[in-house]
Image (spheres, grey):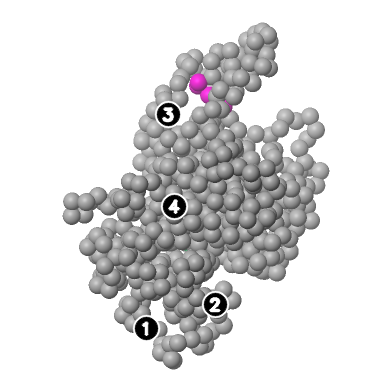
Amino acid sequence: MASLQTRPGMPPRQLSTTGGDYDMANPSEVRKYLGTYGLTPPAIEEYEVQAQRCLRLLAMKTAPIEKFQYLVHLRATNVHLFYRLLSDNIKELTPLIYTPTVGEACIRWHEIWTQPEGMYLSWSDRGNLRKILDNWPHEVEMTVLTDGSRILGLGDLGVNGMGIPVGKLALYTACAGIRPECTLPLTLDLGTSNKTLREDPLYMGSRMPKVTAEEEREFLDELMAAFVDKWPSIVIQFEDFKNPFPALERYKDKYCMFNDDVQGTGAVIVGGFINAVKASGIPAKDHRAIFLGAGSAGVGVAKQIVEYFIKEGVSEDEARRKFWFIDSNGLVTLDRGDKLAEHKVYFARDDNNGRQYQSLSRLIDFIRPTILMGLSTIGGAFNKDILQQMAKLNDRPIIFPLSNPSSKSECTFEEAVLNTDGRCLFASGSPFPSLEHNGRLLTPGQGNNMYVFPGIGLGAIIGKTVNITQDMIYASAESLSTSLNKKEVADGWLYPDIRRIREVSVIVTRGVIRAAQKNGVDRAVELRAMNDEQLDAYIKERMYNPFNERDTNIASAGTNGITNGLSDAHL
Ligand SMILES: NC(=O)C1=CN([C@@H]2O[C@H](COP(=O)(O)OP(=O)(O)OC[C@H]3O[C@@H](n4cnc5c(N)ncnc54)[C@H](O)[C@@H]3O)[C@@H](O)[C@H]2O)C=CC1
Ligand SMILES: CC(=O)C(=O)O
Ligand SMILES: [Mg+2]
């Protein structure tokens, strides 16, 4: 294993979480101090000029994947500039570094990869995971890890799934101010069931079938122990695992971890759903939901809506029975003859009286749902007829096509608007543009866990929590639902404007910390005495702000030599 260690005497390795030495804003003195004088064009540029160049470069590229590649390059060469640009243009750039473009990037990762951006741990590395973590050149506060086995709605992409941890952690930094060098994108290389990729000469992972569930569990046990040995306060986010439930059950009370697809998605949808229920004019107890897709996200969302219904005074049994799930074998019932996966049993129907499932449309006729949720990965499944049926049954049908990326969305915003006379209460997993309908500008909600996971992670970091409890997750949903400003509420929005995401993340983070305090899992006990205003100020203070970084560079250059003339040595 010695060869995996950093060689003694070598400078710390730099990954794309650093940068700024070649920032065009650096004045001559700083360039001299850094030894970069003469290595950049002579002009000293304000951020606005640099941003203009970046945006022009982006505009020159026509395909989203080319824009994605340019942004990868920018982050690798000037991380603070990248985050300034992202913060200032979050609405326009998020679709390029996250869903939908990250979906294409993952499909083509083996073709477009140019530089390291995270860590890979292979099945053959077991026994050595702790030592390999020593190769990561920074202290880590937050990691997102995937085994690549269910990347968005695109199936098993093996190590090509690395785009997801990289993209999620970029949002942690942009939306919640986690310092970029404190994040670790991690992809497990445990084989892949994707035969086409395994046989592709450019594929960069192990060319073996996916290990068994039992083997993966052993591997994860070693990894989780290695994480906390190396970084005792690390917060761990599991992402895009085909079957995330066993790991969540096994680790949630032992480590500071959560699963974003089950819990983060549940929270973000409850956040928007609370507002949709208010707007629908129908009390919680009278809603009925059909879910297309009964996987980790579908069941995660429904379980948290059950929690919401219970808080609204509905009994648990009554709440559970408001859901009808459809999976690839039809309506999920106890008597349909297959062995149901454990996570589906709670919602399986026992009241179908032997009737067979025929189609979504027939089920809608029969159940008369107020809510239609899509977490099925089947693009276009909510077709014109389905949407019109929902519009006939409801004044304000709740239509949430949540599958990602856009190609997998069960319908587009335009389809939903046109087929419900603009009456639908809508949120989708991937973004869709606003549109005019009958003289009104309608804006879709984006029901994507990006509204909550940054605040869940930051809350756990700042609160120094031992675990991430279900109350902390639920608090993120409630906080999100209250984060809309007056105009957003007046305009009937379900989610706040993404351009306010840093403000929203402060509210979510505060809610998460307060819930941790109630549960007694917080170790930052000094925060307990703070009122909300003080806590918000503290959270903001802790957030990385890329716009302050140049000043920090200059200040540290000042204290380290410029002022006493050492900089001349670099000329
Ligand atoms: N908006 C958001 O924030 C999030 C969206 N998602 C998206 O949700 C989708 C599902 O994710 P998971 O539940 O984790 O995947 P999964 O693989 O666990 O579940 C997919 C479900 O869809 C069902 N399905 C497949 N074909 C079907 C068909 N023809 N008719 C009816 N059901 C069918 C499967 O049987 C399964 O129950 C993905 O596209 C993912 O990107 C996931 C997490 C967050
Ligand atoms: C958004 C997300 O986590 C997913 O589609 O899997
Ligand atoms: Mg996911």
Point 60% across, 42% down: residue:
530
Task: Residue under label 2, please give it.
Answer: 346
In the rendered image, residue 21 lying in the magenta stretch gets the answer yes
Res 51 label = 3
Q: Are marks 1 and 3 in contact (CB under 8 Å)?
A: no
Q: Are marks 3 and 4 in contact (CB under 8 Å)?
A: no
Task: Residue under label 1, please give it.
Answer: 358
The quadrant of the rendering that contains the C terminus is: top right
Point 44% across, 91% down: residue:
354
Question: Label 2 amino acid?
Answer: Tyr
Task: Residue under label 4, please give it.
Answer: 482
Check disc 4: other Cα within 10 Å, few if <14, some if 14-19, many if 20+.
Answer: some
Callout 2: CB less than 8 Å from ligand 1 = no
Q: Nearer the N terminus, badge 1 or badge 2?
A: 2
**In front: label 3 or label 4:** 4
Determine the CA span between mark 2 and mark 4: 30 Å
Q: Nearer the N terminus, badge 4 or badge 1?
A: 1
